[in-house]
Image: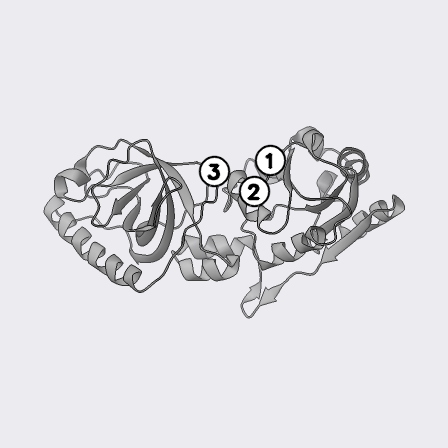
Amino acid sequence: MIPLCTPEQAHTPTALALGSFDGLHAGHRHVIEAVAKDAPGVPTVVSFWPHPREVLYGEPRLRLDLPTEKSCLLAQLGIEQLVLVPFDRSLAALSAETFVNQMLISTLKARRIAVGANFRFGRNREGDTNTLQQLATAAGIEVMVSPILEDNKGRMSSSRIRSALSEGDLQTAKALMGRPYRFRGRIVRGRGIGQTMGWPTANLQVDGRKFLPGLGVYAAWACIDKEGTPLPAVMNLGPQPTVDPTSPSAVEVHLLDQQLDLEGRELLVEPVQRLRGQQRFANLEALSNQIGHDAELARSILSSRQVKIEDQA
């Protein structure tokens, strides 16, 4: 895993790709390739944290890739450090020129800068790629602007990935990201109701900043900690309408045909296919019978698919 660091901690000089790069789709990778190959400095990705819209407009921005997950993925692309620029209102107030001079030139000592064609920066988003090229070129810094990539359904974007995940469409999300969607969580003690029904579940505590798929029941692969072979599983994502309609949304994973003590450990989960939406059943017996059907369907789906889950954090 490459290091996460502040601008002041970064190794310099840098060849940097500047942007959020959430989801690391093909368009993002095209920008990053510009600084990972034949770089005139340390290959670096620079992103703002938290997201500017969280600070400026109070909009929560859940991430497809948390920083630790992203650092592992960036290492595979030839990047050597991920720099997180703390975003606050004082930074937002900087003019485009001041941001380039203070952050990119003085602090990060950029020798090459790569951005996407829709990149905007500076106070009130006053700066665009033309602004960046003028300011950087004047300082002898090479600027590379990557075009927006499109497929037959439109431009590649993090929004399309989020939309697919919200609809439980894991295959489209996978195609857009060029890799399976995954998340991890620590296993915490639940109420034990699944155990009494014969369907014990691992209750996951997932980082609240992580974007999760739409509510429902999924066939999934699960890997315990950083070890072993991925195990077939059924995952319920959402509240418990039969057990407790007032309960908050939760992530529960039942490992098929396994009896393991998992409390306190971590699961890396790869949802594969949405089986059904959330339902409220007449009683626990009806719920148990439905889980049995879900388990059989999940076994059938997963038995036909090969998987290799590698650690992402």
First along the sequence among labels 3 and 1: 1
Structural distance between the alpha carbons of marks 2 and 1: 7 Å
Colour convention: one colour
Mark drawn on residue 4: 1
Quadrant hosting residue 219: bottom left
Mark drawn on residue 209: 3
Dot 1 lies on which element? Answer: strand
Residue type pointed to by label 2: Ser
Question: Does residue 291 appear to the left or right of 306 in the view shown?
Answer: left
Q: Quadrant of the N terminus?
A: top right
Q: Is residue 283 visible?
A: no
Percent across and percent down for residue 31 are 67, 54
Percent across and percent down for residue 239 are 29, 41
Dot 2 lies on which element? Answer: helix
| C-beta proximity under 8 Å, tags 2 and 1 | yes
Task: Please tell me whether mark 3 or mark 2 is closer to you in this view.
Answer: 2
